[in-house]
């Protein structure tokens, strides 16, 4: 446990202030202690790999929790692959491939944890987590216990889930199918290559900033409005991919939010479409 712990470096944007308290629980016993704090009114924020969050410059009150190594495991049972929620999604995709199991190829270059991917219903190349998820176990802070949920009961939609309030994923099970390992690996290398070609992976970013509106692409709208390269302080709409914001050293969360604000306003004025943020704001904004 650390107090006043800077957490910006735990996010792919690499910006943001300190957590009042930072913990990496390793076991259900540790989670019981977090529930006890929550029971007396302490706010709890869950962080995964920090690849879809913008942390406030002012930091985060209460406890910021990131599941520790005890939640980073995987085990195969027939065509089902189980894992802890701290497992990085690309690592799990690689393990599925090594077992000649198909279904998780889309995750090979999504730099999140399994818990964050379930929460966000992460997806790419026409597939998403909800299509291969069998069930999850969540930790309920108010009940201080694990609850099992079937994927059908999580209310998934595009980049959205409806996990029970004040709960977070601790384990997940994916129902996959047998396939030729070489075919799986081929699809993964195509996914990696497509990203290298289209995304600004060398600069800090959070992936897609906005959700795609129905039947359109946020990147297309932002580009059509001439906003590539627009900057506020150290944050800029990527010249390589219009739905990415990239930052330079010294950038603040306020800079990123500034760019988001200008983009939303201009796109609405010029196209009538109101873009919805995909990136999650964490802390005091
Ligand atoms: C270069 C790049 C490319 C990307 N490409 C894609 C892509 O193709 N498709 C896509 O969908 N996303 C993409 N993303 C976004 C991001 O990787 C995904 O949304 C990912 O699933 C987030 O997981 P995370 O562990 O990083 O979550 P975080 O960013 O840490 O958290 C995101 C949200 O999930 C919650 N959360 C975290 N862990 C848990 C848990 N255990 N239980 C419940 N809630 C939790 C957090 O509270 C927060 O609300 C990309 C990001 C980057 C930087």
Image: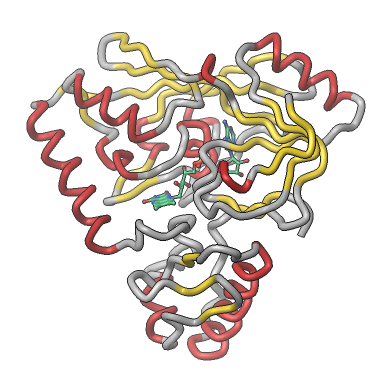
Q: Is residue 95 above or below residue 248?
A: above
Residue farthest along the front direction in this orientation: 249
Q: Residue 86's spot in the image, x, y percent?
A: 50, 26
- Position of the N terminus by quadrant: top right
Horizontal side of residue 86 vs 102, given as left or right: right
Horizontal side of residue 216 vs 253, given as left or right: left
Q: Residue 24's spot in the image, x, y percent?
A: 64, 24
Q: Quadrant of residue 181?
A: top left
Horizontal side of residue 98 vs 2, given as left or right: left
Q: Residue at x 59, y 78 (%)?
A: 232
Q: Residue at x 61, y 53 (%)?
A: 280
Q: Is residue 95 above or below residue 56?
A: above
Q: Residue at x 21, y 56 (%)?
A: 194
Nearer to me, 283 or 9: 9
Horizontal side of residue 266 vs 222, given as left or right: right
Residue farthest along the bottom direction in this orientation: 270
Q: Residue 222's spot in the image, x, y percent?
A: 44, 79
- Position of the C terminus by quadrant: bottom right
Nearer to me, 177 or 240: 240
Q: Quadrant of residue 239?
A: bottom left
Is residue 216 in view from this perspective? Answer: no
Q: Quadrant of residue 127?
A: top left
Q: Residue at x 52, y 18 (%)?
A: 69
Q: Residue 213's spot in the image, x, y percent?
A: 46, 68
The mark total stands at: 0
């Amino acid at each position: 446990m650390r107090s006043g712990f800077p957490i910006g470096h735990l996010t792919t944007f690499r910006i943001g202030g300190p957590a009042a308290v930072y913990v990496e629980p390793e076991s259900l016993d540790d989670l019981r202690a977090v529930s006890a704090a929550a029971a007396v009114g302490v706010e709890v924020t869950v962080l995964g790999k920090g690849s879809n969050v913008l942390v406030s410059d002012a930091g985060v009150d209460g406890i910021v929790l990131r599941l520790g190594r005890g939640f980073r495991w995987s085990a195969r049972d027939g065509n089902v692959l189980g894992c802890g929620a701290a497992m990085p999604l690309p690592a799990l995709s690689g393990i599925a491939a090594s077992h000649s199991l198909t279904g998780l190829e889309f995750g090979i270059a999504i730099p999140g944890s399994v818990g964050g991917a379930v929460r966000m219903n992460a997806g790419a190349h026409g597939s998403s987590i909800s299509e291969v998820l069998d069930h999850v176990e969540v930790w309920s802070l108010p009940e201080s216990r694990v609850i099992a949920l079937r994927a059908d009961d999580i209310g998934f939609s595009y980049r959205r889930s409806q996990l029970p309030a004040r709960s977070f994923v601790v384990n997940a099970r994916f129902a996959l199918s047998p396939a030729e390992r070489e075919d799986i690996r081929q699809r993964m290398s195509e996914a990696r290559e497509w990203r290298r070609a289209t995304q600004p992976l060398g600069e800090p970013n959070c992936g897609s900033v906005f959700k795609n509106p129905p039947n359109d692409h946020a990147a297309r709208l932002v580009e059509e409005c001439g906003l590539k390269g627009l900057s506020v302080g150290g944050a800029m709409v990527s010249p390589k991919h219009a739905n990415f914001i990239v930052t330079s050293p010294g950038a603040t969360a306020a800079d990123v939010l500034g760019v988001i604000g200008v983009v939303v306003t201009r796109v609405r004025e010029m196209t009538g479409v109101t873009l919805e943020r995909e990136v999650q704001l964490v802390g005091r904004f």
